[in-house]
Image (spheres, rainbow, N blue to C red):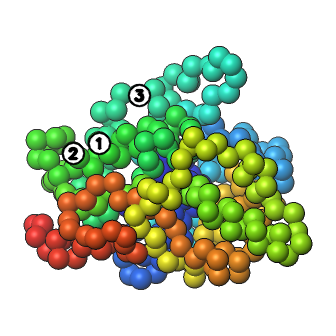
Amino acid sequence: MAVHAHPDDESSKGAATSAKYAAEGNEVLIVTLTGGERGDILNPAMDRPGIKERIHEVRKEEMAAAAAALGVQQTWLGYVDSGLPEGDPRPPLPEGSFATLPLEGPTEALVKVVREFRPHVMITYDEHGGYPHPDHIRCHEVSVAAYEAAGDPGAFPDAGEPWTISKLYYTHGFIRDRMVLFSDEFERHGQESPFKEWLSRWDSNRGDLMARVTTQVECGKYFPQRDDALRAHATQIDPNGIFFAVPLEWQQRLWPTEEFELAQTRVTTSIPENDLFAGVDAASEAQP
Ligand SMILES: [Zn+2]
């Protein structure tokens, strides 16, 4: 189970891993917490009449196409996107939006989905949200709370039979080493690197996320499916944008993995891992 804040996050964070596990016969469920109603239209080709007016439905259609591209199941928790507040001082979040709600409601809603789907592994964002959006930070908080509560018979007794998740992971996408590798490859080919400015602005105080990575999943074979899923989010992802700047062949050759951090585990495993289910098989037999 991968828990995400908005439709499109599942396609930009750990998507090839989801596609791989689904293709290998596992049941994979994406849980999307909000409808993504406040996402800007980031693809110039989609910034046209008739899209903004029905953005809620458009994003549902896009999400269905992305899930189909990845071969995964998907469900909505139905919360309202908080938007990314901009300005100084930052305006307050819209009333009733996801990040303004008390933790308890969304946690119970997620626990209910966990107890129905009974995942062995849950994926979410780290405590910084991976990206400083209030819904992403809230997604982390709700996921961690649900990981704790789902197996506890005393917690949310009306939300189904308890189910204990074996492992909790954070997905890590902004790996500096990976950007450097791709940047160098552009230069080797005599081309300007699209990451040059990004790397020059790199804040060394952010630390190296690679130091937190415990698990690298080999999934280069599924990068084309990831890209199809990204393109399915046509209002959010510009097909001429940075997501598609690096040729697939370079990605598959130079960095064919996706990165995760084992945040919590209830089974025995050894680090580094190359499989999110490492240690799970034997332990899962023990649950009713
Ligand atoms: Zn998001």
Q: With respect to residue 184, does 30 lie above or below? A: above
Q: How far apart are marks 1 and 3 (CA)?
A: 14 Å
Residue on which the image places disc 3 = 101
Residue 252, quarter of the rendered image: bottom right
Query: Is 253 or 202 nearer to us in this picture?
Result: 202
Residue at mark 1: 145
Q: Which of marks 1 and 3 is in front?
A: 1
The residue type indicated by label 1 comes to Ala
What residue do we see at 21% from left, 45% from top? 149
Instruction: Measure how far apart labels 1 and 2 are at the Cα level.
Output: 6 Å
- State the residue position of label 2: 149
Q: Which residue is drawn at 29% across and 42% down?
A: 145
**In-front residue for pair 76/1:** 1
Residue found at x 83% / y 46%: 48
Where on the picture, by quarter, is residue 248?
bottom right
Closer to the chain start, of discs 1 and 3, is: 3
Q: Is mark 1 on a helix, strand or loop?
A: helix
